[in-house]
Amino acid sequence: MAVHPIDYRYGSGEMRRIWDEENKLQSLLDVEAALARAHAKLGNIPEESARVISERANTEWVRLERVKEIEAEIGHDIMAVVKALSEACGEHGKYIHLGSTSNDIIDTANALLIRESLEIVEKDLKKLRSILKELARKHKHTVCIGRTHGQHAVPTTYGMKFAIWLDEVQRHLDRLNELKERVLVGQMSGAVGTMASFGDKGFEIQKLVMEDLGLKPARISNQVIQRDVYAELMAFLAIVASTLDKIALEVRNLQRTEISEVSEPFGKRQVGSSTMPHKRNPVRSEKVSGLARVLYSNVIPALLNNPLWHERDLTNSSVERVILPESFILLDEMLKSTITVLSGLEFFPENIERNLHMTNNLIMAEPLMLKLAEKGMGRQEAHELVRKLAMKAFREDRDLLAVAKENEGIREFLSEEDLASLKPENYIGLAPKIVDNVIAFIEEKEREEGL
């Protein structure tokens, strides 16, 4: 019976498969097999034994049900795997797990699971990057109102919004590449990390095992890969979640009835409310923002897992059983939901235009001030004059430029033509060029990746 929503509601089958019990068991068996092969290469065990162990280190020979039966009897998860694999290998089973300790197997297997998971995250980040790049390109001239403190500020473009997110997604891809160097690390160093159980062949065994599995060997460990590595991983996942939360929050705000500039895609048969048939709620974006809160909260236990008693204790283990699969599966859901939202994002140009002109040209206060300064009035004097005129226009619910035309100080410095030039569409600065620069940077990154 499924209990946690990651079992039946969130995440793709691809990501859930990585973290299901069968695949986790297979990863542990893969590490045990690699260890046996390393021993055989160094002449520590017969090659025939390594061959049999490798052939039978899979979930067809080692059944999850049998592992659970043994664990229920002996109360140790890794020894249950070792015993079940030993049963499957007969006389060759005596060479399994030779010289290693539990976390040699667990931490190295975790690195395999994390590697698979990060491949999916990377693939989806690149897909999101591609969607944002095209949106930025398409809407670099779509002028809209910019908002600060929730209030109308000065004009910007939708291309700027998308390019901001695009640049951020690229930073996540850069972080991910750097992260792999530190996170995709395994160990084979025995109890408390001294390699004493491997004699003078410890470095060779660890090197062979990690080469076999495609991982980097830890330079030093004390029976566990140090959990600052996992804390960095969890922080990375949470930072990616924060970007998706940011995007979702903006979509939600822009979909407000009073704003209604963009909207999530809404299916022909989609139901918005169980009682209000007219509703078109931004449910995907709300889900993304909600799940982000779980990922944020998982960073704290990851940080707390780094300080352990002496060489190690077990307080990190139970936590990681929860936060690793949960965070990857929830982020997978968030990424795919964000891709869906942005791929089908609806625009309402008439509302974008309406909102741009909603304040009776109050948003032209800054360019009016700068135009006065350009024509010779002191900047501070211009600021105070325009501030007073803006407050007057607001109180009287009149157009700012109409109020400005009536002021002697304005007429002294500005002509009718000057005032007529003060339009929102004319005050987007270098926004299109800024967007072009971001797109050019991203395309260079894509070329480097060989896309």
Image (cartoon, rainbow, N blue to C red):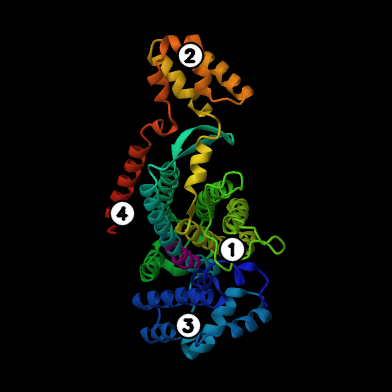
Does 90 appear in magenta? no
CA gap, disc 3 and disc 1: 25 Å
How many other residues sit within 10 Å of disc 3, few (<14), some (14-19) or many (≥20)? many
Residues under labels 3 and 2: Cα distance? 77 Å
Look at 51% across and 76% down and name the residue there: 23
Numbered disc in front, either 4 or 2 = 2
> In the rendered view, does 60 fall on the left or right side of 66?
left
Residue 157 point in image, percent of width and height: 43, 40
- In contact (CB < 8 Å): disc 3 and disc 2: no
Residue 282 vertical position relative to residue 214 in the rendered view, above or below: above
- The residue to which callout 3 is attached is 58
Quarter assignment of residue 360: top right
Task: Estimate the spatial distance between the alpha carbons at disc 1 and disc 4, rounded to whole Å.
Answer: 30 Å
Q: Position of residue 442 (x, y in %)?
A: 33, 49
Q: Nearer the viewer, residue 100 or 368?
A: 368
Q: Which mark is residue 382?
A: 2
**Pair 3/2: label in front:** 2
Q: Magenta segment, which residues?
A: 110-119
Which residue is drawn at the image coordinates 33% and 38% (left, top)? 433
Q: Amino acid at mark 1?
A: Glu
Task: Please state the horizontal and vertical placement of residue 256, each as a whole percent of the image.
Answer: 60, 47
Most frequent secondary structure within the magenta stretch: helix
Sort mark 1 into few (<14), some (14-19) or many (20+) by Cα contacts within 10 Å. Answer: many
Mark 4 element type: helix
Which amino acid type is shown beneath numbered disc 4? Answer: Glu
Q: Which residue is mark 4?
A: 446
Q: Compare residues 177 and 189 and report the one nearer the observer.
A: 177
Mark 2 or 1, closer to the camera:
2
Which of the 4 quarters of the picture holds residue 205? Answer: bottom left
Q: Secondary structure at mark 3?
A: loop
